[in-house]
Image (cartoon, rainbow, N blue to C red):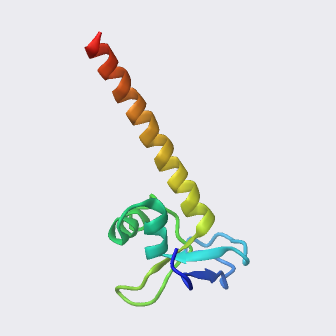
């Protein structure tokens, strides 16, 4: 991860109005993309589509989203588990075809 990409959450409320831990480490869209192994554009689409929770959006049209690092890591683990299940199903299909 790039140095200087983490922020300490200063807001007590998220964009949805829920309370958050004021000590949570926030990361940028770019850092989230790196953890998730996707592009920053894909992370923005995930945030805008409600598939990845974010804490706040920085001002401006191109303002970065800020994400809780633990939330992004949980999303990455979920993506890995889903991919593993998909690959296992594909492996089982190939074994059926080969037999």
Q: Position of residue 89 (x, y in %)?
A: 39, 27
* Residue 91 against residue 95 in the figure, above or below: below
Position of 20 with respect to 98 (left or right) is right
Residue 45 figure quarter: bottom left
Camera-side residue: 73 or 14?
73
Q: Residue at x 40, y 66 (%)?
A: 43
Q: Is 35 on the left or on the right of 9, as rendered?
A: left
Query: In screen coordinates, is 70 left or right of 61?
Result: right
- At horizontal 42% and vertical 30% (from top left) the residue drawn is 88
**In the image, residue 8 above or below residue 97:** below
Q: Between 97 and 26, which is closer to the camera in this rendering?
A: 97
Quadrant of the frame with the C terminus:
top left
Q: How many marks?
A: 0
Direction left: furthest residue: 97
Q: Looking at this rendering, what residue extends furthest in the front direction?
A: 98
Q: In which image quadrant can residue 17 be found?
A: bottom right
51 above or below 63? above
Q: Residue at x 38, y 70 (%)?
A: 44
Q: Quadrant of residue 61?
A: bottom left
Residue placed farthest to the top in the image? 99
Where does the image place residue 67, in percent across and percent down from the top left? 54, 72
Residue drawn at x 39%, y 35% is 86
The image position of residue 92, as x and y in percent, is 37, 21
- State whether residue 57 is above or below residue 93: below
Residue 11: x and y, percent?
A: 65, 83
């Amino acid at each position: 991860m790039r140095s200087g990409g983490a922020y300490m959450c200063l807001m007590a409320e998220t964009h949805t109005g829920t309370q958050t831990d004021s000590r949570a480490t926030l990361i940028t869209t770019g850092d989230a993309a790196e953890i998730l192994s996707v592009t920053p554009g894909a992370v923005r689409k995930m945030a805008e589509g409600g598939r990845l929770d974010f804490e706040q959006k920085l001002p401006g049209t191109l303002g970065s989203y800020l994400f809780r690092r633990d939330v992004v890591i949980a999303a990455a683990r979920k993506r890995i588990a889903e991919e593993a299940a998909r690959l296992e199903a594909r492996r089982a299909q190939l074994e059926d075809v080969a037999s």
